[in-house]
Amino acid sequence: MTPVDGGYRYKPLINADIFGEVDKSRLRQDKPVRGTPPSISQPNSGQLKKLRKLKPQLGEPVGNTNTIDPNLTEGSLINHTRFGRGQVVKIEGSGNDRKAEIMFDKGDIKKLLLRFAKLEVLG
């Protein structure tokens, strides 16, 4: 570190010689020699009570999601907007993590998260 006028120092990240003069507006001040560091404000008792009363809401869809058709079961024929027609082979999970394994008419099998999959139940 190199001392500069006014009690400021700078610590160059790279060799300043390749860029010319050092920009004095970017200089850092010396670390305080004495005094107490600023304190971090702690929550008061009223704020703590509010935080304790908050309960997480689990199992509900998050954001803009589709409703899952209750008629969707293993063996159901479906239509997907991108992949086309298919048949549900397996359903697993619960809540937001419910997935369906679907064999589409083109022969490929896909696992889709039901809260995002845009499925139309055909039968």
Image (cartoon, rainbow, N blue to C red):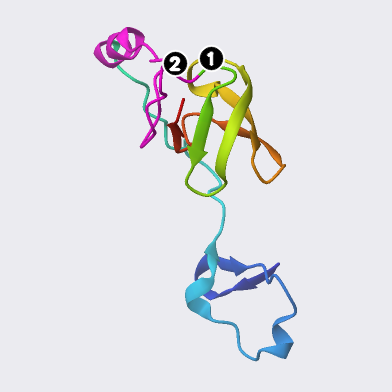
Q: Report which quarter residue 12 is drawn in.
A: bottom right
27 and 61: which is toward the camera: 61
Farthest left residue in view: 46
Q: Position of residue 102 (x, y in %)?
A: 63, 31
Q: Mark 1 packing: few (<14 Cα in 10 Å), some, or many (20+)?
A: few
The residue located at (37%, 34%) in the rendering is 63
- Work out whether 112 lies above or below 11: above
- Tag 2: residue type? Gly
Element assignment for label 2: loop
Q: Position of residue 121 (x, y in %)?
A: 44, 29
User: Predominant secondary structure in magenta?
Assistant: loop
Residue at image mark 1: 94
Q: Position of residue 99 (x, y in %)?
A: 58, 25
Q: Is residue 74 left or right of residue 16?
A: left
Q: Is 63 colored magenta in this rendering?
A: yes
Q: Report which quarter residue 23 is drawn in.
A: bottom right
32 and 18: which is toward the camera: 18
Q: Mark 1 and 2 residues: CB-CB less than 8 Å, in contact?
A: yes
Q: Earlier in the sequence, mark 1 or mark 2?
A: 2
- The residues bearing labels 1 and 2 have C-alpha atoms spaced at a distance of 8 Å
Element assignment for label 1: loop
Q: Position of residue 88 (x, y in %)?
A: 60, 26
Q: Over which residues does the magenta segment extend?
A: 46-72
Residue at image mark 2: 59
38 and 52: which is toward the camera: 52
- Tag 1: residue type? Ser
The residue located at (59%, 16%) in the rendering is 93
Q: Mark 2 packing: few (<14 Cα in 10 Å), some, or many (20+)?
A: few
- Work out whether 18 lies above or below 108: below
- For the residues carrying marks 1 and 2, which lies nearer the camera in this image? 1
Q: How many marks?
A: 2
